[in-house]
Image (tube, rainbow, N blue to C red):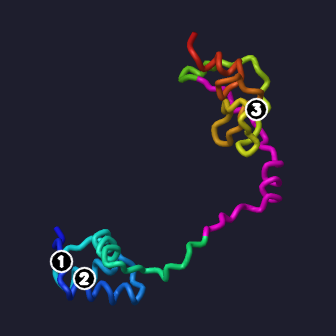
Amino acid sequence: MALPNWPAPHVTMLHELLASGAPFSEIAISINRKFGTSYSRNACIGKAKRLGLSKTNNSPRVARTRVRNNPAKVREVRATRVKFTPAAPMTNEAGIEIKLRDAPVQPLHIGLLELTGENCHYPYGTDHFTFCGQKHLEGFPYCAPHVALTTKG
């Protein structure tokens, strides 16, 4: 646990390291090594704040602007279609084909980047997923046939 009142040499070193631009984590490590203390990074931040010290020059903060992808490139990617190739039929150990439940709907097989909130999000495929893409049922992420397939009742 850190001392409640920092001795003058500790405060002096805090001043010096802050003036040199050192990060608070390094300031804590340096003071601890020199004086055998166990100040945390947050203890150094708190002490500097109570002393009225600042690492910055008190200039107003400049908001960071988020760099976005090139919209033309995004549209180009969205325009590409994933080719759907149906998986080979599944069989059990005896070689008998296993019939999977299927919904009575013709999927559009749209890619992930083409999905909107209006599309059915029911997935198709194993390695390269596509999605049903039909209009979803209000309150569900799937179309009516896929809701019926995936819910009990």
83 falls in the magenta region: yes
Q: Residues within 10 Å of mark 1 (few under 14, many from 20)?
A: some
Q: Disc 1 marks which residue? A: 37
Give the secondary structure at mark 1: loop
Q: CA distance from mark 2 to mark 3?
A: 61 Å
Q: Quadrant of residue 98?
A: top right
Q: Which of the numbered marks, if any, corresponds to residue 133?
A: 3
Q: CA distance from mark 1 to mark 3?
A: 62 Å
Tell me: residue 66, above or below residue 14: above
- Point 47% across, 80% down: residue: 56
Q: Disc 2 marks which residue? A: 31
- Point 60% across, 72% down: residue: 62
Q: Quadrant of residue 88?
A: top right
Q: Give the mark toward the camera: 2 or 3.
A: 2
Q: Is residue 16 left or right of residue 32?
A: right
Look at label 2 and name its amino acid: Ile
Give the secondary structure at mark 3: loop
Q: Residue 68: x, y in percent?
A: 71, 61
Look at label 3 and name its amino acid: Gly
The magenta stretch spans which residues? 63-91
Q: CA distance from mark 1 to mark 2?
A: 7 Å
Tell me: residue 17, above or below residue 43: below
- Count of marks, rendered view: 3
The quarter of the picture where the C terminus appears is top right
